[in-house]
Amino acid sequence: MTEVLVVIGVGGMGEAIARRLGTGRQVVLADFDEKALRRVAEMLTEEGYQVRSQSVDVSRRDSVAALAEQAAALGPVTAVAHTAGLSPAQASTAAILAVDLAGVAFFLDEFEKVIAPGGAGVVIASMAGSLTAGYLPDEAEAALASTPSDDLLELPLLTASDLAQPGAAYAVAKRANQIRVQVASMAWGARGARVNSISPGVISTAMGRQELANESGAGMRAMVAASGTKRLGTAADIAAAAAFLLGPDATFVTGTDLLVDGGAVAAARRGGL
């Protein structure tokens, strides 16, 4: 039976992952933006990929559950990439928390039920989460780790005035992604599967370029300039990382975060800025 690759979010990273890993697999593409979903599905189909598309709202558990069930009906789900998300330049605090935080939690819950033995998943987090590590109180990290997914958005720490700005909400959501992947790795492991997160730096996708043009753009450019590579990342850089984590060379890697940022976080932490 043909193996199934599920890619949630068809932006630059999702498209690159589907193209890199979709050969010989049944590819299931999912997104909230039906126009973008149709465009990418048609393009990949024309290129010879075997593609199904499904509208999904990751902020709703029932929608994510329906996607997981439909993907599993097509064959063994051996690889899943969750790339959907909103950035501070795109959305309000409430929307960011609903999509970037709760949406990932629902994904980890629902795809753990259908991932095939030997399969693997990746979640796109962010270097913002890596920069936030160590700044959240221990009790906040513990709450983000252990609170049931349906109750996450009710946490007092997520309604605090400190998170009124979308940028702060985004950083906390992405740190939560890293933490919840660690916790989920045990449940996924019970099924003989793995799950990890990838934390991209400044990537030249449509979303990344929008952030560079926003008020935070100057700080982001400074981090790139101070980094060891001194360049923007590409969607292909992230697809390469996903290929490793989802592939046979990473069978001893689970519950961890792979920082793919060109050295920006290293520069920020060690005096390069």
Image: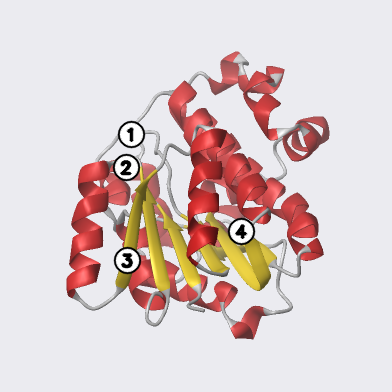
Residue 55 visible in image: yes
Q: Quadrant of residue 33?
A: top left
The one nearer the camera, 202 or 60, is 60
Name the disc covering residue 270, or none: 4
Helix, strand or loop status at disc 2? helix
Q: Earlier in the sequence, mark 1 or mark 2?
A: 1
Q: Earlier in the sequence, mark 3 or mark 2?
A: 3
Q: Who's the residue at 51% across and 79% down the image?
A: 1
Q: Nearer the viewer, mark 4 or mark 3?
A: 3
Above or below 119: residue 41: above
Decide if residue 203 is on the left or right side of residue 128: left
Q: Are marks 1 and 2 in contact (CB under 8 Å)?
A: yes
Q: Nearer the viewer, mark 2 or mark 4?
A: 2
Q: Who's the residue at 44% across and 26% down the image?
A: 95
Residue 77, position in %: x, y? Answer: 56, 66
Cα–Cα span, label 4 and label 3: 45 Å
Residue 234, position in %: x, y? Answer: 33, 66
The one nearer the camera, 138 or 227, is 138
Q: Earlier in the sequence, mark 2 or mark 4?
A: 2
Q: Earlier in the sequence, mark 4 or mark 3?
A: 3
Q: Are marks 2 and 4 in contact (CB under 8 Å)?
A: no
